[in-house]
Amino acid sequence: MGGILGGMLFRSLGFGGGYDAMGRSIGLFEIILIAAILCGIYSFIRGRRQGAVHDAYYQSSSMEVPVYRASSGSEYDRSQGEEDLKRGLSYVRQMDPSFDEKRFTDQMTDQFFLIQGAWANNDVSGIRDLFTGEMFKLVGDDIAKLKLDNKINQLDNIAVRSIDMVEAWQESGKDYITVRFYANLLDYTVDETTGQVVSGSRTEPVKFEEYWTFTRPVGNHPWQLSAISQVDA
């Protein structure tokens, strides 16, 4: 395209004869007009090509969100082994020498009971600081749906059988530790209008295994729940 425009311009300046199909000479105005049209066509074609590349990128991309109450088998598949866990915890201690594994698991057990209790009361607003922003929204949306359906998911007689740290790492200036909870409880949903149990059982306890991931900015900061991966018993 540049060669065509250049040739037309040189002819208009006297370096060659510029004539149209009727034998009339082509002036500078006509050349500018033709150049503008050709440039417009080129920009249109280029824009379509860039748009196609842009669309292909977003179609092949996906945004990852925390796994929350997944139930189709084990969603946790990043187990690193004991040595990798120790290495991850050593990174955590580099920025927080006061970090203690026993104190951490005790604190996370407390948070586990607080979150389960708030969930059963259909209100987690009082423990907002225990969640990351994204996780708080996910839990809040589920509670809003229960309220809309006039239902309450009751969690009674919770007993934690074991709690183990299974993974630790640092990423983007944050600490992450995943904890495995093995517990049992009475899990049932009640219709608020009738008081009837619509799912689960008031008398038959269920065992469950969940992986809770907690995060914080590196250093001695409060931990927040960022993801839950649930495994069917």
Image (cartoon, rainbow, N blue to C red):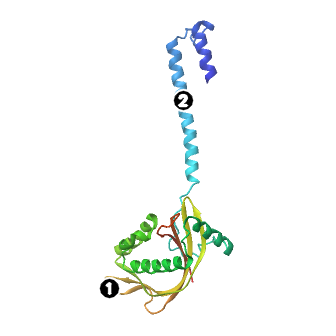
Residue 194 badge: 1
Q: Earlier in the sequence, mark 2 or mark 1?
A: 2
Q: At which x and y percent is residue 57?
A: 58, 49
User: Any mark on residue 161, and which?
Assistant: none
Relative vertical location of residue 152 with respect to residue 4 in this rendering, above or below: below
Q: Residues within 10 Å of mark 1 (few under 14, many from 20)?
A: few
**Residue 67 rendering spot, x and y as whole percentages:** 53, 69
Q: Amino acid at mark 2?
A: Ile
Pick the front one: 217 or 29: 217
What residue is pinned by disc 2?
A: 41
Residue depicted at x 56% and y 71%: 177
The residue depicted at 36 percent of the width and 73 percent of the height is 126
Rendered-image quadrant of the N terminus:
top right
Position of 141 relative to 6 (above/below) = below
| Residue 186 x, y percent position in the rendering | 46, 88
Observer-nearest residue: 69 or 183? 183
Q: For the residue labelled by badge 2, is the local secondary structure a helix, a strand or a loop?
A: helix
